[in-house]
Amino acid sequence: MIAIVDYGMGNLRSAQKGIEKSGHEAVVTDDPELISSADAVVLPGVGAFKDCYDGLDARGLVRPVIEAAQSGRPFLGICVGLQLMFESSEEGGHETRGLGILPGRVIRFPAASKTGLKVPHMGWNQLFLTPERYCPLLQGIERDPYVYFVHSYYAQPSDPDIILATCQYGVEFAAIVGRDNVFAVQFHPEKSQTDGIKILQSFGNLVGRKI
């Protein structure tokens, strides 16, 4: 069973439906014990970074989520869920603490006056797999697929080795990151049609495997 962390925000039901469509069982929960006992954990996210972190903190879920990521079980962050996994974000005009599961910070896209591109980055865009880095989430997917994004901020990892795929939107940014059992995607796989469902299926297939 895959636990989807409920902290009062995010695309909880759509994430659950996407995972179920991929053939895996998923439950939305804010129960720390269930998160601790699940076969795998998903941290979704829609909204502002600080509000999402505060939602976790208010429910006593910061420590259980960090421990889940450190447990060796498959762990997946989606959209703001990816951003929360880093050490901090500049969203809101000042540095806000994140979960610190991965090294780095979250920054805003350059203004449209600099790139000619509107912020937020919204819609379909292409992934570019990082050469010579294996990403188990992308098994069975055509190389460099298109996926669906909605975000104004992006992660800037301090360790380039965790970047598994990138995307271009005025700047190159990390679209998939991962280390050991921990993965995160900036796009919404549950909104990315067939390839997105395959990504969720591949994540669920990691349960019980040595990653």
Image (cartoon, grey):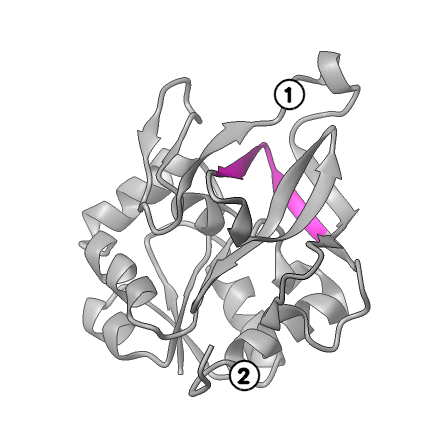
Residue 65 part of the magenta-drawn span: no
What is the number of the mark on residue 110?
Answer: 1
Q: Residues within 10 Å of mark 2 (few under 14, many from 20)?
A: some
Residue toward you, 68 or 128: 128
Above or below, 79 against 13 in this view is above
Q: Residues within 10 Å of mark 1 (few under 14, many from 20)?
A: some
Above or below, 90 against 16 in this view is above
Which percent across, then down, holds residue 17?
56, 72
Q: Which residue is mark 2?
A: 205
Q: Is residue 184 visible?
A: no
- Does residue 3 appear left or right of residue 143 in this picture? left
Amino acid type indicated by mark 2: Asn
Q: Quadrant of the N terminus?
A: bottom left
Highlighted range, magenta: 148-157
**Residue occupying image coordinates x 44% and y 67%:** 180
Amino acid type indicated by mark 1: Pro
**Residue occupying image coordinates x 60% and y 78%:** 201
Q: Is residue 7 visible?
A: yes
Residue 151 part of the magenta-drawn span: yes
Image quadrant in which you'd find residue 63 = bottom left
Above or below, 38 against 162 in this view is below
Q: CA distance from mark 2 to mark 1?
A: 37 Å
- Under circle 1, the secondary element is loop
- Under circle 2, the secondary element is helix
